[in-house]
Amino acid sequence: MPRSGADARRRLQQAALELYQEQGFDQTTAAEIAARAAVNERTFFRHFPDKREVLFDGEADLRAALMQAVAEAPEGLEPFEILLCAFRKSARNLENNRPFSEPRWKVIAVTPALRERELAKHAWLTDAVAQALRQRGVDHGMAGLAAGTGWAAYQHAVQAWIDDPADGLDTHLCRAFHDLRALFTSALPMQARPEH
């Protein structure tokens, strides 16, 4: 029975996620994923270079969306406010896709090879956000620091949302950025003068 490319891709992603939950990432083969998705193994490799990448589909789209959201944030905002606007906008897709997002995060959390891949993804996205801030005129070093810190707050919010879905992801994001500001504010009086 012929299947559209998009349909086959979705079926492969769902099949992979189910198998990773049932028997673990390391024990699952591309052939098993293809069989579960009712396609052949060649179709699997037409869509994904390896079995890790099934869980990282859409990375380039997310990067582009984040950079665009940073670029489109209102003028006059501080870097953290720009990032909060951008993350809130991109988080809608994650929240709408929770049935896939939540088990995906859980599989990654218990699989070292996937955690390593996730860290590489985070580094790539953090660099993209920093680049987008620089394009808005934020100082080079400040953009990198804001992007790294803001991304950490974003990840903290997503994990809190996975652990406690009673509040939406937007609420967790706003809380994380509020706590980040409070943390910085409380640390300021204790700053030591830089030594020369």
Image: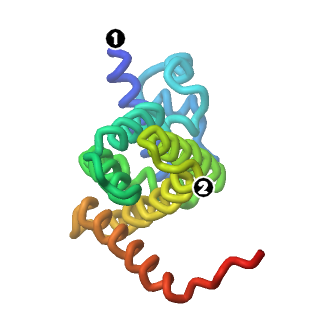
Which badge, 1 or 2, is on the more N-terminal residue?
1
Under mark 1, the amino acid is Pro
- Residue at horizontal 41 percent and vertical 72 percent from the top: 180
Q: Residue 23: in sight, yes or no? A: no
Q: CA distance from mark 1 to mark 2?
A: 34 Å
- Residue at horizontal 51 percent and vertical 52 percent from the top: 143
Task: Estimate the x, y position of residue 32 in percent, counting from the top left.
Answer: 53, 33
Quarter of the picture holding the C terminus: bottom right
- Residue at horizontal 59 percent and vertical 26 percent from the top: 49
The residue indicated by pointer 1 is: 2
- Left/right placement of residue 80 relative to residue 28 reads left
Under mark 2, the amino acid is Thr
Q: 134 or 174, which lies in front?
A: 134
- Left/right placement of residue 74 relative to residue 116 reads left
Q: 190 or 34, which lies in front?
A: 190
Q: Is residue 118 above or below residue 68?
A: below
Q: 122 or 35, which lies in front?
A: 122
Residue farthest to the top, as pictured? 2
Helix or strand or loop: what does disc 1 sit on?
A: loop
Task: Estimate the x, y position of residue 117 in percent, counting from the top left.
Answer: 61, 46
Asked which colour scheme the image uses, the reply is rainbow
Residue farthest to the bottom, as pictured? 190
Task: Estimate the x, y position of residue 35 in percent, counting from the top left.
Answer: 48, 28
Q: Is residue 168 above or below residue 97?
A: below
Task: Estimate the x, y position of residue 121 in percent, counting from the top left.
Answer: 55, 44
Q: Few, some or many C-alpha atoms within 10 Å of disc 2 (few <14, some 14-19, many ≥20)?
A: some
Please give the label number shown on residue 111. Answer: 2
Residue 72: quadrant of the picture: top left
Q: Nearer the viewer, mark 1 or mark 2?
A: 2
Please give the label number shown on residue 38. Answer: none
